[in-house]
Amino acid sequence: MALGRASQQLDLLDPVTRFCEGTLPGNSIFVFLHQHREVLFPDAVFTDLFAMIGRRSVPPSVVAVVMVLQRLEGLSDREAVDRFTFDARWRYAAGVGGWDGEGRAAFAHTVLVDMRERLRRSDRPDRIFEVALDAARQAGLIGRKRVLDSTPLYDAVATMDTVTLIRAAIRGLLGAAAAGGGDLAVGLRAVIGSGDAYAGTAKPVIDWDDPAARGGLVDSRARDGYALLSVLDGMSDLPEPVRQAMRLLATVLGQDLEDDGVGGLRIARTVAADRVISTVDPEARHGHKTSHRGFDGYKAHVAVDPDSELITATAVTAGNTGDAEPVTGLISDLLNQTRHEAAGHDSAGHDSAGHDSELAEAEGPAAEGPAAEGPAAEGPAACYGDSAYGAGAVLELLEQTGIDAKTKVQPPVAAKGKFTKDAFTIDLQAHTVTCPNQVTMRIRPVRDNPRHAGRADFGRACATCPLAAQCTASKTGRSITIGHHEARLAAARTRQTDPAWQADYRATRPKVERKLAHLMRRRHGGRRARMRGHTRIAADFTLLAAATNLARLAVLGLNHTSTGWTLDTA
Ligand code: SF4
């Protein structure tokens, strides 16, 4: 399919155009898209997605406008196309005018599906987000502060219990084998001993109140699974879909089952750390936003510029991923700027003598990072986040790159009101810990532990200590562990007691919560993912962020002139 070109000459007497220009407020997203659509989404932005010859596509700038408005209003593909067809504001924003003009009267909802797929397979799947952010940067709206936060994204599939998971994984494997042709599917079916045809999703009919019947069902389906895997074990020329189905079945069997001690298999008593919860979306995970609030699916992460309230980066991870994990990607623009400055270049890419950076040109835009421009780009770089971002590794990253750490560090906690760790004096120079009873013990190194670098055991001293009831219930006495980032965390805890630090934190960090609430407010495509699989959900969330940014830019009065993007100060 070849690139369809948007009409450049919209009739100024067009009734839709005249009506919208007379009625819509100037800071409306419809007006913003109408005025700047051709600058934001010129044909050149989408040329690589289409062939040179063939039937003309719907102009990508028109589709891009529809995709933005669709995400902003939380609509399905059919609903979005319906709005484009009948809503004057959508037609005005897309620049197609009224129904009797030269613009398009309508297009099929599959055009949106096709465009998402083309973008997903391209080198720049997030280009709509990028063009909006580049416009904001040019106008000097992106500063050197970032606020980070995450929120649950519920998956679009039902969470499966163990029996359903195993049966679905077996059904998937049999289906993949049958699709590959040959005798493989016949050979696999020959080893199924339970008599289950694995033909549908309905659970086998048993007495579910009978523990023995439930146990027998789990055991028999698990044995089917292992028998199938043993047939495939060692086969080197299996088609890739069969390999994928085989891996999924092995994962499901391994995560949910354990030996029952009498020669059978039963559902494991403990939940595997990285448990697959659905064969329909095997990348979704069970996660916790708080210790009491669980969810199934993914986590959406954002970095926000707190002054302009624009989203500067997004990430989507499995629901069980810690918030600290995607931090490097979320603040990569800030990291690139500060590293570049440390190498002797200012934030706009000039060296200390004011010349354009040859290094930046040699490294290219990805290595340099987007240059910050305008007054907002001045001042120290800072990163804000709640205690989920107060991990030692995050503090280390910020410290090493010269970014001011405004991420809160959790105070130490202890069970049942006992002395917390900060009641002990830790002297890392002398390698000692002194307890509230003034007993001093040496810190012993702990090797090969991801969390602890050392440990001080008070042991027998606790047996006769008058403060023991306030300190420990352990018969072997109190122990204090020393983390890999102990000094850094202690310094951060001290720093965050400063009233000025607290006032800045309180004034800045909540802005990201408001932004997340804004992103999640629509029922369709807000909190609940609209699609399956990490890649598609991440692209969809980034598109939502792009749409939200464009709406924000309209409110801020961004305008494009002959000199580029500027803020409308009139
Ligand atoms: S219980 Fe042990 S660690 Fe705690 S104050 Fe007494 S001696 Fe020190």
Image (cartoon, rainbow, N blue to C red):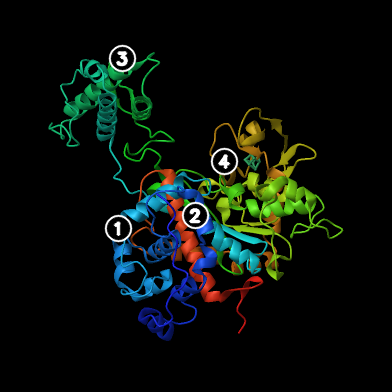
Of discs 4 and 1, which sits in the foreground?
Answer: 1
Residue at image location 34% in from the left, 31% down from the top: 269
Residue 257 percent location from the top left of the image: 33, 26
Dividing the picture into quadrants, the one containing residue 259 is top left
Q: Is residue 307 left or right of residue 206?
A: right
Residue at image location 69% in from the left, 43% down from the top: 486
Residue type marked 1: Ala
* Residue that carries the numbered disc 4 in the rendered image: 472
Q: Is residue 356 left or right of residue 220?
A: right
- The answer to the question of whether label 4 and label 2 lie on touching residues, with beta carbons closer than 8 A, is no
Choose between 158 and 216: the one closer to the eye: 158
- The answer to the question of whether label 1 and label 2 lie on touching residues, with beta carbons closer than 8 A, is no
Whether disc 4's CB lies below 8 Å from ligand 1 is answered yes
Dividing the picture into quadrants, the one containing residue 432 is top right
- Determine whether the residue tagged by mark 4 lies in a helix, strand or loop: loop
Mark 1 neighbour density, 10 Å: few (under 14) some (14–19) many (20 or more): few
**Circle nearer the N terminus (4, 3):** 3
Q: Is residue 35 left or right of residue 284?
A: right
Tell me the CA gap for discs 1 and 2: 19 Å
**Circle nearer the N terminus (2, 3):** 2
Residue type marked 2: Phe
* Residue that carries the numbered disc 2 in the rendered image: 46
* Residue that carries the numbered disc 1 in the rendered image: 108
Of discs 3 and 1, which sits in the foreground?
Answer: 1
Mark 4 neighbour density, 10 Å: few (under 14) some (14–19) many (20 or more): some
Tell me the CA gap for discs 2 and 3: 48 Å
* Residue that carries the numbered disc 3 in the rendered image: 231
